Every structure is written in C-alpha cells, then in structure tokens.
Amino acid sequence: MMDEILKGGSAELGLELPDGAVAAFEKYYELLSRKNEVMNLTAISGAEDTARLHFLDCAALLTMAELKGRDVVDVGTGAGFPGVPLLIAEPGIRSMTLLDSLGKRVDFLRECCAALGLDGRAVPVNARAEEFAAERRESFDAAVSRAVARLDVLVELSLPLVKPGGFFAAMKGPKGREELDGARRAIELLGGGRARVCDYTVPGTDAVHSVIIIEKIAPTPKKYPRRYAQIKKSPL
C-alpha cells in the first residue's frame, strides 16, 4: 500500500523518485514506528498517513526549491522532517545537517540514517539553532524547516546559518501568507530579501500547505541570532 501511495503521489507532484527510494521510505517508516512506541516522535501514525502527510509532504519541497548540489541545514528536524525524506528523494543533495536540540532525537536520526545508507550525506547534530550559528554562521547554501515555530521566530533561527546568495525554505500550513506578513521586518533586518509563497496540495488529501522561500541577499548582523528566550519573547 505505501509503495502505491508514494509512486502515485510523487507522480502527482511531478517528481520522479530514484531507484531504491520507495524501499528506503518503507524502511524509514518501520524505524519511525518502532521508535515511536517508546518515544514521542510524531503524532501521525499508520503507513498511509505517514506516506502522505510526512513523506510526500516533505518531498513536495523539491518541486519548489532547488537543493541538488547544495549543503543544506534542516532547522528543528525532530524525527527527520523534512531532511530525511529530501535526502531519500533527491540523491543530488550534497549534505543535509539534521539539527535538533534533543539528544534522544538526534541519536535516533544517527541510527536511522546509518540503516538507510544516508550517513555519508546526513549529518545529525545535537544543538540549539541559535548556538549552532556561532559555529556555522553563513556556511550553508540553504536552510529548510517544517512545523517548528512562527515565521517571525523561525527566520532569526535560520537565516543566520545561510550564505548570502542562498535561501531559507519554511514549510507551513494554510496560514503561510499571514505569517509572512508578520515577519517582513525580521526578514529585512536579518539580511533576507524577496520572499515568495508556493501553495500545494498534499497528494491523496485535501490539505493545502505552503512553502515560503526567502532569499538571503546580505550578511546577517552579528548581534543576531539572540538567545532563544529573547527571540520568543520579543520577535523582530
């Protein structure tokens, strides 16, 4: 059943999955389901919902943002979304840093990526984004994130990691445009430029989601990002 959903859904998105991708997604689902029994990784369960609402939803980003040949950071990856599905669906991604603040999740991702044969390109890192920026400031071609925080908070955690000339892609629900309106000042202060919103329907559902793609046109001032408590209390 999962293989049919993935093949049909990817075709609906206009994606051609590489050889071995469906088997990798099925293995990922097994690992995710097993770990979810002892650790809260995702509220979405079952092969059909996972295939549509996690795997295809994440893979949809490849139709809107060019990640091939790029070094990417997935900010607040959680159980590996969207980073792991992106690595499975696009073998041309040079590297994907899977950044998360919870050590247990990062331990799972290390095991998972090794089992999926992604450990050469996947780089799980246990750190807070605002602290990681001190080490890897403006060293990535692109940042991605899915369902982590409001955009006005998220841009301060993500844009400092992106090189000028790169971009940040935030995967959002149906209120993406509303969040963008509230984050324009933050985007400008952090070196961001033009932002575009791409809407899409998750295959096999009536769920309409959006991706907000923000260009990085100038270096982020050194005073950003601030401490997370300050970011959350007083978004730019």
Image (tube, rainbow, N blue to C red):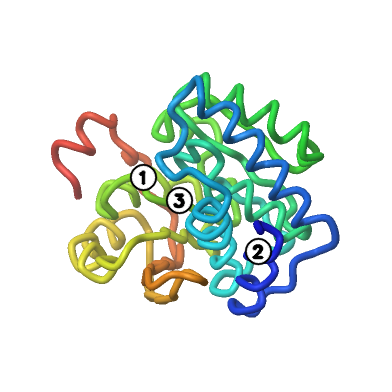
Identity of the residue furthest to the front in this view = 1
Quarter-of-image position of residue 63: bottom right
Q: Which mark is residue 148?
A: 1
Percent x, y for residue 148?
Answer: 36, 45
Percent x, y for residue 106?
Answer: 57, 26
Q: What amino acid is found at the position of numbered circle 2 in the picture?
A: Leu
Q: CA distance from mark 3 to mark 1?
A: 7 Å
Across the whole image, how many numbered discs are drawn on residues? 3
Residue count near mark 2 (Cα–Cα under 10 Å), binned few <14, some 14–19, many ≥20: many
Residue that mark 3 sits on: 145
Q: CA distance from mark 3 to mark 2?
A: 22 Å
Residue that mark 2 sits on: 6
Depth check, mark 1 against mark 2: the one in front is 2
What residue lies at 83% left-to-right and 55% top-to-bottom?
Answer: 20
What residue lies at 57% left-to-right and 62% top-to-bottom?
Answer: 56
Give the mark nearest the N terminus, 1 or 2. 2
